[in-house]
Image (tube, grey):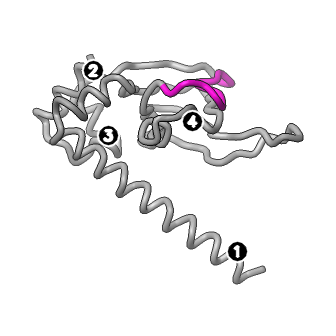
Amino acid sequence: MISISELKKQVLFEDISDPELKKLAKVIKELSLKKDEFLFKEGDDTKGIYMIRSGKIEINKVTPDGWKQTLAVLTAGNFFGELSILEKRMHEANAVAIENTELLKLTKEEFEKMEKEDVALASQILKKLALVMSKNLRRMNEKFLNALINY
């Protein structure tokens, strides 16, 4: 079982109380990927929300003409896979380890169970998801506007 101190290192769980983290520790799965190993590919079924413990994950898409486009490179503390969970759809991109990587996973089934049985905890996680996504969107907008201004 994963430790509470380990869960607190994850951005997604940093504001959650110890008693709530104990509940999460019971359901969080640990995964290891070797360099160049795919966690999922575009079109795969959603399995959960992934949090990076160590290593790096590249999120990418391959264009119709075969070019790989990197969307993000994520490091320890980052999470991903949340959009597919929230939207209840298949993955829209690939996730591949670009170095040996250790992950934590909150499965889709456990998250959906939590939404029904522990609404307070699910709400805390959803609020953090929304805050991080909002911050990322603002940062992307700023980069886009700076690129337009400097063009």
Are there few (<14), some (14-19), or many (20+) residues within 10 Å of tag 3?
A: some
The residues bearing labels 4 and 3 have C-alpha atoms spaced at a distance of: 16 Å
The percent coordinates of residue 115 (x first, y second) are: 25, 35
User: Which numbered disc, 1 or 3, marks the residue closer to the eye?
Assistant: 1
Residue in the picture at 18% in, 39% down = 119
Instruction: Pick whichever of labels 4 and 1 is earlier in the sequence.
Output: 4
User: Which numbered disc, 4 or 1, marks the residue closer to the eye?
Assistant: 1
Apparent side of residue 108 relative to residue 123 in the rendered image (left or right): right
The residues bearing labels 2 and 3 have C-alpha atoms spaced at a distance of: 17 Å
User: Which numbered disc, 4 or 2, marks the residue closer to the eye?
Assistant: 2
For the stretch drawn in magenta, what is the main secondary structure? loop
Are there few (<14), some (14-19), or many (20+) residues within 10 Å of tag 4?
A: many
The residues bearing labels 4 and 1 have C-alpha atoms spaced at a distance of: 26 Å
Q: Does the magenta-highlighted stretch encompass residue 81?
A: no
Q: Which mark is residue 9?
A: 3
Residues 16 and 127: in front is 127
Q: Amino acid at mark 3?
A: Lys
Q: Which mark is residue 27?
A: 2
The residues bearing labels 1 and 3 have C-alpha atoms spaced at a distance of: 33 Å
Q: Quadrant of residue 78?
A: top left
Residue in the picture at 15% in, 42% down = 120
SS category of the residue bearing label 3: loop
* Residue at which label 1 appears: 147
Q: Amino acid at mark 4?
A: Lys
Q: Amino acid at mark 2?
A: Val
Residue in the picture at 86% in, 37% down = 66
Q: Which mark is residue 56?
A: 4
Apparent side of residue 8 relative to residue 140 in the rendered image (left or right): left
Instruction: Pick whichever of labels 2 and 3 is earlier in the sequence.
Output: 3
Residue at the far top: name it.
1
